[in-house]
Image: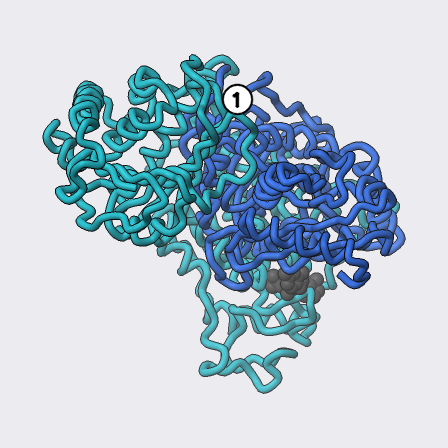
Chain colours: A cyan, B blue
Amino acid sequence: MSERTEVRFSKAKAFYDTFERKGSGDKVTHYCPGCGHGTIQKLIADCIDELEIQDKTVFLSPVGCSVFSYYYYDTGNIQCSHGRAPAVATGVRRTLPEAVIISYQGDGDLAGIGMTEIVHAANRGENITVIFVNNAIYGMTGGQMAPTTPMGQKTPTSPFGREVLRDGRPMGMAELIASLSAPVYVERCSVATAKDVLKARKVILKSLQNQVDKLGFSFIEILSPCPTNWGMDPVESRVWMQEQLAVLFPLGVYKDVTTHLVAVDPGKFHSPMDDDKLRELLRGASEVPVQRSSPLPHTQLIKVAGFGGQGVLSAGELLATCGMSEGIQVSWLPSYGPEMRGGSANVSVILSEDDIGSPLVDHPNVFIAMNGPSLDAFEDAVAPGGLILVNSAIVTRKVSRTDVRVVYIPATELARQEGLLSAANVVMVTAYLYITKAFSIETLRRCIPLVLRKKAYLNQNLALVEKVLDHCVRTAGSAGSDESDGSAGSENG
Amino acid sequence: MGKRLMKGNEAAVHGALMGGCTHFFGYPITPASEIAQAAAFYFTSAGRVFMQAESEVSVINMLYGAASAGARVMTASSGPGIALMGEGLSYLAGARLPSVVIDMQRAGPGLGNIWPEQSDYNMVIKGGGHGNYSNLVLAPSSAQEMFDFTRKAFTLADQYRMTVFILSDAYIGQMMEPVEISGPVLHGTRKDWAVYGDAASRPNLISSIYMNPPLQRKHNELLQDLYRQLEREQVDYQDIQTEDADLVFIAYGISARICLSTVHALREKGVKVGLMRPKTLFPFPKERIRELAEQGKTLAVVELSSGMMADDVELHVRGRTTVLRYLTMGGETPTVQELIANVERDLMVRSGGLSNV
Ligand SMILES: Cc1ncc(C[n+]2csc(CCOP(=O)(O)OP(=O)(O)O)c2C)c(N)n1
Ligand code: SF4
């Protein structure tokens, strides 16, 4: 057969002279006589030579009959797991902007197990060349049905023929890939006849040239004979390809936008910062300066709880930042997950002179209740002798425990008076510090700017601190005297 | 640099950048998504590669590709995602490719929930995929260690040409603590085995195939030698008040933190307890466990699983001492009070002469 003479006698440089990885001095491939893989792989080697890209080429072998492609290609070689070569190619592409990457895959590999990887690599428009060898069955494992197997075809796993209700219809991959917007070149060809082979060579060459020109994703489907598993001789199988396969999978160009494209710039992903800039980036804005005011009276096991949106987590962050800035040990652990959405949020903060073990606060000695449901949830957990701070602008009930200290602060109201809708958290933290003297108020003033997300509100927040202090001083005299009106600073217990 | 208050998840990304990681491939899953999100910001800002893949299967294969091309690569996920990576992890091991994978463990089986468990232990310590292979597994228990361990993981991965796991949990990732971003910025160097798409690396092949059984056997034996070498060179653990302890907790990650509080509380009551915290789970500090057993100390394994690490502890104890199991599953954690009660109960029973604890 003329097409085989054509490729057989011209030894491509991109092929090794002898296939040492296969066996010492070996010169024949492992493919069966009449197999399409051998023909296609020689065409690819030939094109690599013609484009002079042998050094730059990284050839990806799939799992399938072509798994040993690295026996033959004198190029960089990577053997990939079943179906994942396009993901591997993506990893290589993002690392080596100049390499020419060939993902060579069978139809079980690409259209079966690897469907996800090929579609997404195509959709990202990876600048790679995919050679998709469609022999309508799983060759290596013994000719089982593939997604491309024709209707009615008998295989070891469809012994009574492929049946639509059970197996669905054969998939046209060229059609599917061409339906995406990113691929630049999609063509289906064949190696059934000498003419087909010559055409396939042109198509492969173009697909590689596209990549060299950095145009994007090229997908070449090649109908290929598997005489062994089709139970035909090489001549019969070529007839069957023309009469059956090429009817099911029509040859031709499915997409070609390469003429009006410019090269994509891979440099975008490859401009690492120098070390000094990186350190600057990582230093960020929130490095905390350490300055000690007074020793902590005892380990503070703090729980803050409220609605999502009340700044519960940032109250915790502010407390932890104050602790850091005092040079003591701190930990901050949020509640998280679905319960955070619209529902309640809580955070555990520990401030300690010693190393912190568990960051979980099961029995807080300070509990800041921003709303009613959180008071209900955690009131009983507070350690005897602990402190409960209640946002009395929202919580209507009184604390029922009598073995704890309770302070009521109309936090939401005080914040609103200062024009801040979501600063009840700052009020509570200020009151906590005023009451416990855990750190100086100066520490708080220093740390607010480090934690505040909306910097434009800094001055208002600082003014709010003064307002809360003022409020605490004014109401301190009445502490314990009037619990019923829920006014700020009033205590019981 | 001074300290910054940050989550373990964010600290890991800082560690990765300082450790010379150039490629992060990710797929969202709670409680590991924050790592991918931080990587998306910091890697991109630093001119390195962040990419969201279409699945964890693709993620691990992108790691395989980028590592084949000589890059320092990583991902982060949680139980279901790590399980999907099993085959890819096995390929990485077979092809001797360096990579770093963070597992922020959540509760299983199945979709389970997003609160912490330590039930990926067997999957990660014993490999995760098919074949005779292991991963180097580091177990951080603070935000600082999330930084430190991730930073050094890339050097270890390159040095031993293997996957280094950071086996952590939902709490260690979510928790904010002061973190010092210290040490020089590390960088990978050219690898003589990698495929760079150039003349010098043209002869190189990345593959896990040895079609000839004697060669496959040899390859397996070399891997086992490598793991024995790790046992000589990389075992790491922390001892806290074990010297005079009657009972020693063995725990890692968040469990170790809870144990530390329990040690403090029990010591205040005069009960002699200590903590041995493995920082490497593979290689496992088996010598240290043997020593503790030979000293006749009662060992109490505290873990958020059905007893996966406890099984390994018992393997090395070989019946020489009592191994207690304080196990919690489902996303719950034991309270310090519960552990105290357990210890008081079990030490009491022991001194009361009942042999069968
Ligand atoms: C995960 C996984 N599943 C299954 C296999 C077994 N397997 C090896 S080759 C193959 C089919 C390959 O068929 P195809 O992609 O059509 O290539 P061909 O052999 O026909 O060239 C299968 C299923 C495997 N190696 N890995
Ligand atoms: S089984 Fe089929 S595809 Fe595989 S080498 Fe033989 S002819 Fe080719």
Residue A381, percent from left and from top:
40, 49
**Residue at image x 55%, y 49%?**
B337
Q: Does residue A207 appear in this view?
A: no
In the rendered image, the residue lying farthest to the bottom is: A160
Closest to the observer, A285 or B226: A285
> In the visual, does B96 lie left or right of B119?
right
**Residue at image x 36%, y 34%?**
A316
Q: Does residue B338 appear in this view?
A: yes
Q: Could you tell me which quadrant the C terminus of chain A lies in?
A: top left
Closest to the observer, B110 or A235: B110
Chain of the residue where label 1 is placed in the rendered structure: B
Q: Which image quadrant is residue A391 in?
A: top left
If the picture is divided into quarters, which one holds ligand 2? bottom right
**Residue at image x 52%, y 56%?**
B107
Residue B332, percent from left and from top:
51, 55
Residue type, label 1: Glu
Q: In the figure, A144 relative to B117: above or below?
A: below
Density class for disc 1 (Cα within 10 Å; few <14, some 14-19, many ≥20) is many
Q: Dot 1: what SS?
A: strand
> In the visual, does A278 lie left or right of A20?
left
Residue B80, percent from left and from top:
53, 56
> In the visual, does A434 lie left or right of B247?
left
Check disc 1 and report the residue beneath it.
B180
Q: Which image quadrant is residue A459 in?
A: top left
**Residue at image x 21%, y 32%?**
A479
